[in-house]
Image (cartoon, rainbow, N blue to C red):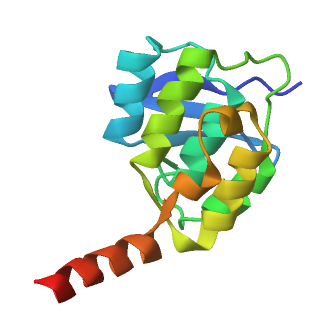
Amino acid sequence: MARAPHLTYERDELTLEMAVGGTRRRFDLSDRAVSLLQDDFDLDAPDIVPFVVAKSFVIAGAATVPDEEYDPQGQAWTIAGADGGREATVDELRALAAFLRGTTVDERVFETMKEHVEQTRLAQYLDPAELRSRADRVDGLRNIAKDL
């Protein structure tokens, strides 16, 4: 049976370990993701990370496999090991929703992120319309530049 996503340390850096495509993988975490896990969720190795959080990090690009081509959509589709994990608390879902509101999602996985939000309890705290893609951000910056 696959183990639920959990935190580990590698080279004194907090990482996220989970099953992807039948193998265990260690994902490097962005500074914002580490801050959310440690400061807001009070988690550290070897704590289990709720599946909704782990998958959100992968899709958003906040958890990446080092030395591999960035493929969050492929990885998100093959993540396994949620069985026996723990559900996110209401406070964790609210904090994750705030994290995602402040994240610019790669255009290639924008629809995947919206579907992920809609299909999970995260939808109670985050309207998919609140998500921003890189294209949305560029358009917004372009409009600001035009106004100057």
Q: Is residue 30 left or right of residue 6?
A: left
Q: Is residue 18 visible?
A: no
Give above or below for 84 relative to 105: above
Q: Is residue 22 left or right of residue 102?
A: right
- Residue drawn at (40%, 18%), measured in percent from left and top? 40
- Residue drawn at (68%, 62%), measured in percent from left and top? 73
Give above or below for 16 relative to 127: above
Q: Is residue 123 left or right of residue 62?
A: right
- The residue most toward the front is 147
- Residue drawn at (45%, 36%), measured in percent from left and top? 98
Q: Position of residue 95 (x, y in %)?
A: 48, 27
- The residue most toward the bottom is 146
Give above or below for 87 relative to 79: above
- Residue drawn at (66%, 20%), measured in percent from left and top? 88
The quadrant of the image that shows the C terminus is bottom left
Q: Position of residue 83 (x, y in %)?
A: 85, 23
Give above or below for 68 relative to 57: below
Q: Is residue 126 visible?
A: yes
